[in-house]
């Protein structure tokens, strides 16, 4: 694979000086045009030690406007990163729409390094590369442009480069013992890199092998590729239109939906409720601290009909836990900053640290519920969201954590009663809005969306619990009981390990 990057290509000094001014001007023009779009640009600069990754990144920072540019160099995992799923460190660094993010190696560094040092089995390496493909596909489908550069040197050229850098007092510090150690493992690194490039090179996120022997050729090749890719994608960008909302006449399934299986007649009397509440709140208090001690984090998701009782159920949970252990995230319409990123970005930001609990009052499922029904997301966007959501939740679960999801279901009659009650009671009036009444008119549309959501995202690692919510007391106890059962089961497994 790398033979084409060992041909001795060079660029004459005079030709370099001739091309550079026009190239820089065109790069700035393209970057300015990019800033007016919804397209984020991700540039990954990787390659052989000594090939000049830092020089290339510095050149791009010099030739582009740094106000629309971010450079991300991630070293070894921090304690904060180690306490969360691995890809959290990348999600939080992704550039916003209209901006450019340059990653030193990005998500390729660790898999290639581990494989070269033979600390990762072939199957694990292949799995890591498959995850990278899914991750990049997700970003591209959301509108991102991904450019990946592998800067290459032959083994002989690498050795010459490192010796030359060591002799120069101005560049000596850029060569470390680690570089020489990697140089001795040149063949292993090349083999791992070749496999990584081969398995992740695609039309949507292509690799470019750049011969790095001559720095002028190297830098201009990278810059020219960035410019051409920007120009191509900016010209192809079209004005997107919102998808049409669902229409019950064409999409309502025949027969029962999953919500029809919920027995809404279930209820608890006052004394029975008080005893159950005390029991499960006490149990949750102990389990929350036990999970903290074992560094087991928990995500709890609440979805459901308007006026379904999500807030009341959340309050009964938080009453039982120490305030230092949990955080409640109430999800509203995205802010400008959140809208400038992939829709999952704002939820990745709130992933809890080891042993903590994050409670989402509405969540990423808005993509396949309100955004689907109201037409805020195009059909291809919410259709692919099921896979994206399952992958997101699986990463959290594979990290040894717990995902608990509730849909609180109420009947149309009970919802109407609660709406009318809220309008009459002064301290509840703020809870009812015109939007609530509009959503109620689309009950059938939302029923369709909920049915498909549960069918496609209820997994063994993150199952849905459908809560009968017509009786608030019953719903609150069911939520507490489910959380206790899930936490207790997880803690017992960890104790046996």
Image (cartoon, rainbow, N blue to C red):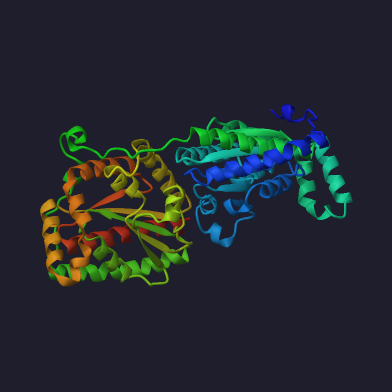
**Hey, which quadrant is residue 431 in on the image?**
bottom left
Does residue 347 lie above or below 355 as drawn?
above
Q: In the image, is 49 to the left or to the right of 475?
A: right
Q: Residue at x 18, y 46 (%)?
A: 443
Q: Of 221 and 133, which appears nearest the observer? A: 221
Residue 258 appears anywhere in the view: no
- Residue 230 image point, x, y percent: 57, 37
Does residue 196 lie above or below 443 as drawn?
above
- Residue 320 image point, x, y percent: 32, 70
Q: Residue at x 60, y 56 (%)?
A: 77
**Hey, which quadrant is residue 218 in on the image?**
top right
- Residue 310 image point, x, y percent: 25, 60
Does residue 261 lie above or below 191 as drawn?
below
Q: In the image, is 282 to the left or to the right of 179?
A: left
Q: Residue at x 88, y 51 (%)?
A: 168
Q: Of 156 and 333, which appears nearest the observer? A: 333
Residue 96 appears anywhere in the view: yes
- Residue 217 image point, x, y percent: 76, 35
Q: Residue at x 39, y 57 (%)?
A: 299
**Hey, which quadrant is residue 113 in on the image?**
top right
Does residue 438 lie above or below 279 as drawn?
above
């Amino acid at each position: 694979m790398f033979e084409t990057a060992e041909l001795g290509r060079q660029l004459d000094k005079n030709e370099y000086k001739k091309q550079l001014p026009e190239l820089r001007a065109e790069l700035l023009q393209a970057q300015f045009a990019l800033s007016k779009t919804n397209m984020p640009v991700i540039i990954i600069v990787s390659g052989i030690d000594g090939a000049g990754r830092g020089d290339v990144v510095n050149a791009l920072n010099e030739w582009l406007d740094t106000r629309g540019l971010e450079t991300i160099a991630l070293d070894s995992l921090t304690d904060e990163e180690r306490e969360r799923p691995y890809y959290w460190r990348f999600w939080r660094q992704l550039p916003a729409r209209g901006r450019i993010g340059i990653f030193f190696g990005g998500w390729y560094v660790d898999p290639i390094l581990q494989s070269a040092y033979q600390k990762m089995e072939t199957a694990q390496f292949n799995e890591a590369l498959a995850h990278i493909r899914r991750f990049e596909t997700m970003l591209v489908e959301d509108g991102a442009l991904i450019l990946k550069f592998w800067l290459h040197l032959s083994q002989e050229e690498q050795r010459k480069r490192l010796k030359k850098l060591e002799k120069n007092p101005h560049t000596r510090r850029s060569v470390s013992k680690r570089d020489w150690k990697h140089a001795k493992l040149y063949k292993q690194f090349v083999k791992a890199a070749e496999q990584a490039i081969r398995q992740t090179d695609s039309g949507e996120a292509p690799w470019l092998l750049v011969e790095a022997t001559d720095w002028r050729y190297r830098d201009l090749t990278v810059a020219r590729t960035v410019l051409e890719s920007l120009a191509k994608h900016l010209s192809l960008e079209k004005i997107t239109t919102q998808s049409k909302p669902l229409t019950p006449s064409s999409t309502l399934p025949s027969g029962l939906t999953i919500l029809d299986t919920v027995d809404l007649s279930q209820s608890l009397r006052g004394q029975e409720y008080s005893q159950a509440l005390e029991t499960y709140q006490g149990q949750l208090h102990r389990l929350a601290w036990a999970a903290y001690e074992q560094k087991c984090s928990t995500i709890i998701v609440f979805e459901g009909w308007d006026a379904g009782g999500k807030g009341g159920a959340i309050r009964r949970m938080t009453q039982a836990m120490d305030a230092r252990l949990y955080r409640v995230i109430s999800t509203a319409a995205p802010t400008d900053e959140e809208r400038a990123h992939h829709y999952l970005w704002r939820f990745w930001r709130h992933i809890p640290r080891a042993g903590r609990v994050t409670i989402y009052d509405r969540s990423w499922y808005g993509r396949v519920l309100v955004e689907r029904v109201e037409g805020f997301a195009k059909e291809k966007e919410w259709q692919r969201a099921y896979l994206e959501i399952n992958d997101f939740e699986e990463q959290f679960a594979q990290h040894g954590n717990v995902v608990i999801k509730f849909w609180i279901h109420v009947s149309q009659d009970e919802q109407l009663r609660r709406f009318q009650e809220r309008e009459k009671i002064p301290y509840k009036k703020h809870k009812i809005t015109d939007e609530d009444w509009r959503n109620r008119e689309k009950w059938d549309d939302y029923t369709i969306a909920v049915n498909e959501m549960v069918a496609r995202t209820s997994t063994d690692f993150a199952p849905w619990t459908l809560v009968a919510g017509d009786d608030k007391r019953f719903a609150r106890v069911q939520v507490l009981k489910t959380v206790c059962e899930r936490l207790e089961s997880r803690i017992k497994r960890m104790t046996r390990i």
